[in-house]
Image: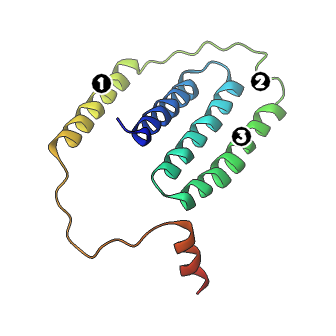
Amino acid sequence: MTLKLGIFYFLAAFTVWASAVVVLGKNIVRSAVALIFGFCGMAALYVLLDAEFLAAVQVLIYVGGITILLLFAIMLTSRIGSTTARVVNDQVILSAIAAVGLLVGLIYASTSGIPAMSGPPRLPETAPFLGRALLT
């Protein structure tokens, strides 16, 4: 296993863990902070895949804008955490069936192979190339 593959696995596991904390968390502030970590993990994956511009957009828009706005909305809401609400999910079985079906479909798609694509070679999608293309 190469170093790049090890870093990819670590970042993927970190992003999945942060997303699970967002979905399964009981405290909304901790879920919002975990959302920040999840978005940063995705940005790190974009950097690892040589898409620096997309990583910068991810950090600026999602981490810097949407999540911070969400945190301010949570903190400025009057005592949202003081009341305890009993959360009952009546669709656990249906969502578990949908998740297993999605997992089976993803496993099938990943093991069946990707058909060869024909066409012109792709242009590099790095930040300097995009900057030159936009400003010339």
Residue drawn 57% across the image and 16% down it: 87
Residue that mark 3 sits on: 70
- Which secondary structure, mark 3? helix
Residue drawn 68% across the image and 25% down it: 30
The three-letter code of the residue at mark 2 reads Ile
Task: Characterize the local packing of mark 3: few (<14), some (14-19) or many (20 or more) Cα atoms within 10 angstroms.
Answer: some
Contact (CB < 8 A) between labels 3 and 1? Answer: no
Q: Position of residue 83 (x, y in %)?
A: 75, 15
Q: Quadrant of residue 80?
A: top right
- Which secondary structure, mark 1? helix
Q: Position of residue 3 (x, y in %)?
A: 43, 39
Task: Characterize the local packing of mark 2: few (<14), some (14-19) or many (20 or more) Cα atoms within 10 angstroms.
Answer: few
Left or right of residue 61, residue 73 in this image: right
Residue that mark 2 sits on: 80
Residue that mark 1 sits on: 97
Left or right of residue 71, residue 40 in this image: left
